[in-house]
Amino acid sequence: MESRHPQIVNVRTLLTNDNLKIPNYQRPYKWTTKNVNQLIDDILIHKDQSEYRLGTLVVHSHDNVADIVDGQQRTITLTLIAYAIIKKQNKTPEEEQALKNFEPKLLNLSFVNNISKANIQRNYKTIERRIADFDGNIILFFLNKCTLVEVVLSDVSEAFQFFDSQNSRGKDLEPHDLLKAFHLREMNKCSTEEERKKVVAHWESIDTAELAKLFSQYLFRIRNWSKGHSARYFSKNDIEIFKGVSPNIDENYPFAVMLRIVHLYVEDYNRSYHRNIDKQEMIFPFQIDETIINGKRFFEMIKYYQGMIDDLKSTEMKEKYPVLNMIKTYAGSFRTGDKYIRNLFYCGLIYYMDKFGDKDLAKAIDKIFIWAYSLRLKLKAVGLDSVDNFALNKGEYSQIQLFKKIKETVNPSDILNLQLETLKENRSSKTEKIVELFKDLKYYD
């Protein structure tokens, strides 16, 4: 595509472009207030950087017009932010100076689609409230340092071909890919190139299917279930759950004090010259339900929990705790519903081990097995909705909110002594081995 001319443009240049238009064939403006708040949060978070890249803009240039082919949602939102800043009441002299000679042309846009109109009106109200945090310096950063990669194509077919290729690649991006990009960007604030290479090398060494499984079936579900939230499917809309405080922990909040102390102590310990002598390394004391420290700690956390899960499923653990072998070998273990139950069991056990280690682990395995597999014996068919409701103690077959109990207790005996139901019948097939263990543990009459 010889007509492609990529260049970096800032918001000021973008919004003062006389030729930039949104063609009629574009879809309606559908950004939600969540999208808007995230964009503004990102601008505020990166306000001290020399530049913050907002994404890519693809335009079709023809007859002195630059039609936006890809990037209209973000461009409209940037226009709304600029308009709100201009209309802001009681601006300070610094804010007035920041806006000097800024005359955005895109403010003349008009919309006929009712969906676009409704979303613009709703989002503008949100933006009006949020730009109260914008002072003169932030306005200058927004206009001059927030940038996009602009790709200009003169042939409309090439423009759509480029858009389609970008969009198809975007569809292939998994939520964990977006998290990787976010946390690598956060690492730029306080890490060396060698550290970044190291975490990327380890991340890339993990099979992408395993990464997707780690997030969707374990970390996402445990974090959500512990908070009493549904956790059926992990999507791009849920990645905020894996974002936390800045790697420098600049947040001046009481909750961040403990994080700052532990984070800096571990950093200091591992960087001490003594480590060259004793070859010891301190692992950050991760907890699945804790506030995440962005950047390097996030990648360390993923490595830590991937290792925990691999150890839990190892041959050594199966030999030591026969239950772990039986749940993968009984006659019906291959069925989809049984896999949902097994995942529920693993999540409960991982959460227990995350908090109490191997303290009374054999008893914990038995207790969590009885809790999870009671749902298998009660139902002829198990769906993901059944498991999700059961974890949240909803529905007729629920008996206890295990994840909430683990989150709230400080003593493993509170989990080991939970009163669980004794079953009297089995409604499922191919679960004879499950029933045998229930009987051995005195939970089946």
Image: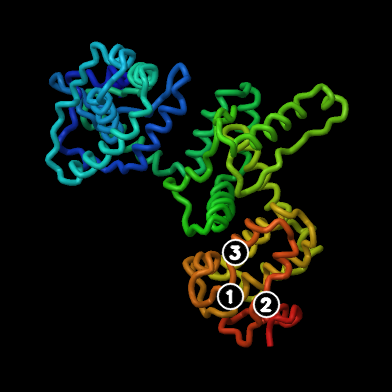
Task: Compute the Cα span from label 3 to label 1.
Answer: 11 Å
Quadrant in the rendering for residue 51? top left
Q: Which residue is mark 1?
A: 376
Residue 181 visible in rendering:
yes
Indicate whether 233 appears above or below 62. below
**3 and 2 marks in contact (CB < 8 Å):** no
Q: Quadrant of the N terminus?
A: top left
Q: Which residue is mark 3?
A: 344
**3 and 1 marks in contact (CB < 8 Å):** no
Q: Where is residue 404 shown, x and y percent of the image?
A: 59, 60
Q: Which residue is mark 2?
A: 434
Task: Compute the Cα span from label 2 to label 1.
Answer: 9 Å
Task: Compute the Cα span from label 3 to label 2.
Answer: 15 Å
Q: Quadrant of the C terminus?
A: bottom right
Q: Nearer the viewer, mark 3 or mark 2?
A: 3
Instruction: Report crowding for label 3: few under 14, some 14 to 19, many 20 or more residues within 10 A (C-alpha).
Output: many
Count of numbered labels shown in the rendering? 3
Question: Residue at 57% of width from left, 81% of height from top?
Answer: 428
Residue at the front extreme of this rendering:
90
Q: Where is residue 47 shown, x and y percent of the image?
A: 44, 22
